[in-house]
Amino acid sequence: MSVHAGTRPSGGRVRAAWKAAHTPVAGVPRWARIAAYAIPFTVLPSGIWRLGLLFVDHSAADSGRLPHWLPLDVYVVILSVVSELLAFTAVGLVAAWGEVVPRWIPVLGGRRIPVAAAGVPAALGALALTALWTVLAAVTQVAGTTVQGDPLPDDFPSTAGGWSAVWFYACYTPLVLWGPLLGAVTVAYWRRRTGGGGAGGLDIT
């Protein structure tokens, strides 16, 4: 079986897509590129911790705050996947797809993205994440309460002690960096695009 000219093996397409999604545009500071690439990795450990819940037994209390139609296991998977996808959008602040809509997207493909359309949501997200993880979560852990203000249950991972608590903190502590890193990358994005430092004529095929 031969491979027709002009076709690309699936592995090559994946590598090309990966490169297109991660390659920084001209004018991106090295520190901003590193920070943007690091953001998904600050979120990944907490997702791994949550996915570990799929392999342990759950009591009815575990899902008491969820709608009856949403199983805890489904919620855990959705939350982990969505969190990682949201974290990956930070890469768009240093890559071409954060400045020009990729051509494969119908109707909007090839159009430049207004600075505010990406910068404002990113800035608001950075503020919200910083408030959530750097301030609120840290304070509630010190106070011994949940985010809702309820006392932490006896079997809460951070109060369990031993390796369970160590593993929990090791997976969730990196989230403290999500907001500040996103804020720094957003500032670099805004300065680069409003100050004329970005590359012109960007095109994504």
Image: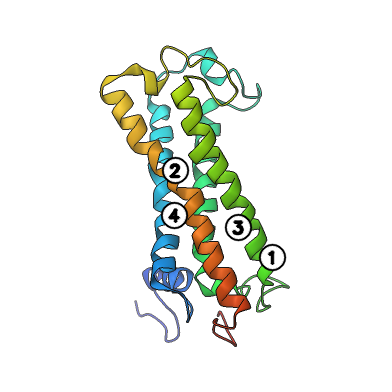
Does residue 183 appear anywhere in the picture? yes
Q: Quadrant of the N terminus?
A: bottom left
Q: What residue sits right under mark 3 in the picture? A: 122
Q: Which one is earlier in the sequence, the residue at label 2 or at label 4?
A: 4
- Asked if residue 43 is positioned above or below residue 181 in the image, the reply reads above
Report which quarter residue 171 is drawn in: top left
Quarter of the image where the C terminus is located:
bottom right
Q: Is residue 48 visible?
A: no
Looking at the picture, which amino acid does disc 3 mark? Answer: Ala
Disc 2 versus disc 4: distance between alpha carbons? 9 Å
Name the amino acid, label 2. Leu
Residue behind mark 4: 39
- Going by the numbered disc 1, the residue's amino acid type is Ala
Residue 95 left/right relative to 68: left
The residue pinned by badge 1 equals 117
| Dot 4: element | helix
Q: Is residue 61 above or below residue 91?
A: above
